[in-house]
Amino acid sequence: MPSSPSVTLQQYQVIADLSHRMLDEARRQQWGQVIALSQEYVQAVEQLKALNELNNAERHARRDLLTKILEDDAEIRLLAEPELRRLGHILGDMKRQQSVVNAYCSPTYSA
C-alpha cells in the first residue's frame, strides 16, 4: 500500500492547484480573480516555509510540481502583459489630466 504524501508535499500540491486556477482565470481575463487567488497563493507559500523537508521520493514529486507551477507562472505573465500595458496607459492619461487640472485650477495667492 503506497504511503500518503507528506504534509509538505500536500502543500506543494495546494500551491500547484492555486497556480493552475490563476492560469485559468488569466486565460478568461478575470484579473480580479487572479489577484484574489494570488493572495491565497502567497499565504500557501508562507505556510510551506514552516514545513519539514522531503525524502528522496517526495523530492522527485516536488520537482514535477515546481515545474508545473513555473510553467503556469510563465503563461500567466504572458497573458497579463497586455493588461498591465493597458493599465499603464490609463495611469499615464490620468496623471496628464491631473497635471492639466492642477495647472489651470490651482489657487492663486496674493501677497
Image (tube, grey):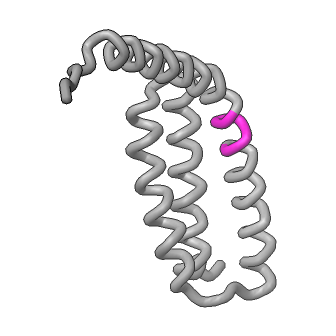
Position of residue 60 in the picture relative to residue 107 (left or right): right
**Most foreground residue, 104 or 54:** 104
Q: Is residue 57 above or below residue 29?
A: below
Image quadrant in which you'd find residue 27? top right
User: Residue 58 at what x, y percent from top left?
Assistant: 72, 78
Position of residue 106 in the picture relative to residue 27 (left or right): left
User: Residue 70 at what x, y percent from top left?
Assistant: 73, 51
User: Residue 21 at what x, y percent from top left?
Assistant: 51, 41
Q: Specify whether residue 28 is painted magenta.
A: no
Number of on-image labels = 0
Image quadrant in which you'd find residue 62? bottom right
**Most foreground residue, 39 or 93:** 93
- Residue at image location 48% in from the left, 14% down from the top: 93
Position of residue 24 in the picture relative to residue 65 (left or right): left
Name, please, the residue furthest toward the front.
111
User: Residue 32 at what x, y percent from top left?
Assistant: 39, 33
**Most foreground residue, 49 or 9:** 49
Q: Main secondary structure of the magenta part?
A: helix
Point out the image quarter for the C terminus: top left
- Residue at image location 73% in from the left, 41% down from the top: 74
Position of residue 49 in the picture relative to residue 47 (left or right): right
Q: Specify whether residue 74 is painted magenta.
A: yes
Image quadrant in which you'd find residue 49? bottom right
Q: Which residues are magenta?
A: 73-77
- Residue at image location 23% in from the left, 20% down from the top: 108
Q: Is residue 31 above or below residue 19?
A: above
